[in-house]
Amino acid sequence: MAGRFYDPDGARYGIPTFPFRLAPDGLATRRQLRAKGLRPGGQDIAAQILWRSRRYGRRVRVAYLYRLDLAKPARPMTPAKWAALAKANTARRTCPDCRRDAGYVIAASLGICTTCADTPALAA
């Protein structure tokens, strides 16, 4: 099964392809780059990892790999970005009915805080 996705030359898939957990050193996913404080920095995809996922109905999943030596430092958050992020998170926690901060992100399925959802509607 692992041999199915092993194509280090890129002859079959167009770019070098490796099975899950078998990528060579010096390559990393976007998430791995971010954990190291790096970003791809405009470089092209160097390789990919392919695997079948049980979680997604046995579909083939892909993770793109970037070279660590070409990665650039991640840009720091500016005060304006921090303020925008705080504002967005506050909006996600504010109930549109009672206008109070629920203290948690309001579920999209409810659209209102659990206190408002549990309160029976007054008969009109």
Image (cartoon, rainbow, N blue to C red):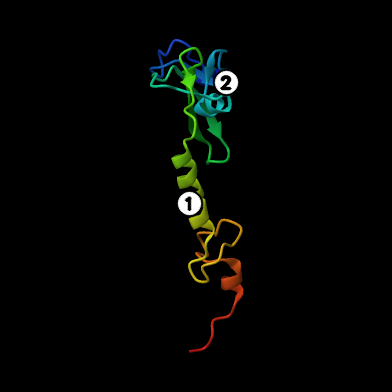
Q: Quadrant of residue 107?
A: bottom right
Pointer 1 residue? 87
Q: Quadrant of the N terminus?
A: top right
Q: Which residue is mark 2?
A: 2
Q: Secondary structure at mark 2?
A: helix
Q: Which x, y percent locates residue 90?
A: 52, 55
At horizontal 51% and vertical 68% (from top left) the residue drawn is 99
Q: Nearer the viewer, residue 96 or 80?
A: 80
Which one is in front, 93 or 13?
Answer: 93
Residue drawn at point x = 53 percent, y = 71 percent: 98
State the mark number for residue 79: none
18 lies above or below 59: above
N-terminal label among 1 and 2: 2
The vertical placement of 30 against 47, above or below, is below
Kind of residue sitting beneath label 1 = Lys
Q: Nearer the viewer, mark 1 or mark 2?
A: 1
List the single residue furthest toward the bottom: 124
Seen from this angle, which residue lies furthest front? 79
